[in-house]
Image (cartoon, helix red, strand yellow):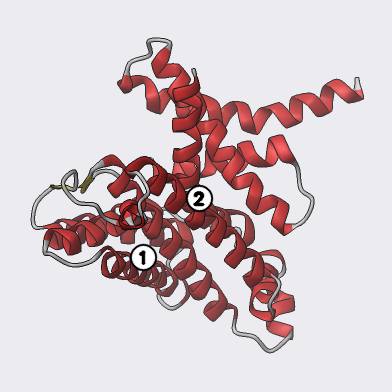
Amino acid sequence: MLDLVLTAVREGLLFGVMAAGVFLTFRVLNFADLTVDGSFALGAAAYAAVLAGGGTAWKGLVLALAAGLAAGAVTGLLHTKAGITGLLAGILTMIALYSVNLRIMGRPNIPLLNTRGVLGWFEPLGMSAEASAWTVTGLFAVAVWGLLLWLFQTKFGYLLRATGDNLQMVKALGVNPDYMEICGLAVSNGLVALSGALVAQYQGFADVSMGIGTIVAGLASVIIGEMLMGSRGIGWLLAAVFVGTFVYRLSIGAALALGFAPTDLKLLTALIVFAALTLPAIRKKVRLS
């Protein structure tokens, strides 16, 4: 049981970075962005390709982040400049990224089991591989939470939130909402790609299809976190994303431990999202009755 919880905590921190990116588009920009299914694998592909070519983990992470930023910007440009609906723009970018990821890796899968990579950064300081992995994972989660909290307290962050809430007000302030949407989508997919790189190192491989279902998992994490912790300010909401990711990963791990087949996980994910969406309304009706 303890191993199950510890695994869920670590995966909650790793995938929580991805869920924070989904939160940025889904809750802040009010934009259902399916690009994340492609940008998650894009980050993993870029990171793995660098390490397989003899590059450093730092270089791989920077390249993964840059690739994610570019993918999000492409979706934003398709939506704002080409006049394509947000949902379709994300789908187009996601489809294109499948081929891009294959080009980057040169093959469908790159193993990373024999590489120290990002999770082993503190091993030269005398830490064990396990302690180093925990330290790096925790530092990345805290850094992402802190940076996003800082971002939302800046003028840019307020304008970003206003873009999702009241587009006309943003225009009245003399700000180009198209620019804000492009920037928001870029930052979101940059975080998703960064999470993909971290997860690839954690799992020991990067695969071209590892991003399938990322948007659903991200939405589940965001919704579960909000349902459990409520809304008490942006810092609390960002923390709720990581808590929701932990609960989601714990639910998946518990289902596997109970004997569910891995092929049932997509159905289980859909049921978790359904429960998270409907429980608040059910509780509200119960209180009113």
Residue at 91% in and 19% down: 289
Query: In the rendered image, which quarter is residue 106 located in?
Result: bottom left
- Residue 192 spot, x, y in % from top left: 42, 56
- If you read the primary sequence from the N terminus, does the residue marked by circle 1 or circle 2 appear first? 1
What amino acid type is highlighted by mark number 2? Gly
Residue at 74% in and 77% down: 169
**For this rendering, which residue is in front, 235 or 29?**
235
Q: Which mark is residue 138?
A: 2
Residue farthest to the bottom? 174
Residue at 37% in and 55% down: 122
**For this rendering, which residue is in front, 213 or 119?**
119
In this rendering, the label closer to the viewer, 1 or 2: 2
Residue 258 lies, with reference to residue 281, above or below; the image says: above
Looking at the image, can residue 211 be seen?
A: no
Relative to 103, is 264 on the left or the right?
right
What amino acid type is highlighted by mark number 1? Gly
Badge 2 crowding class, 10 Å Cα cut-off, few under 14, some 14 to 19, many 20 or more, is some
Residue farthest to the front? 126
Query: In the rendered image, which quarter is residue 47 located in?
Result: bottom left
Q: Which mark is residue 68?
A: 1
Residue 254 lies, with reference to residue 166, above or below; the image says: above
Query: In the rendered image, which quarter is residue 131 located in?
Result: top left
Residue at 18% in and 60% down: 51
- Residue 43 spot, x, y in % from top left: 31, 59
Relative to 258, is 204 on the left or the right?
left
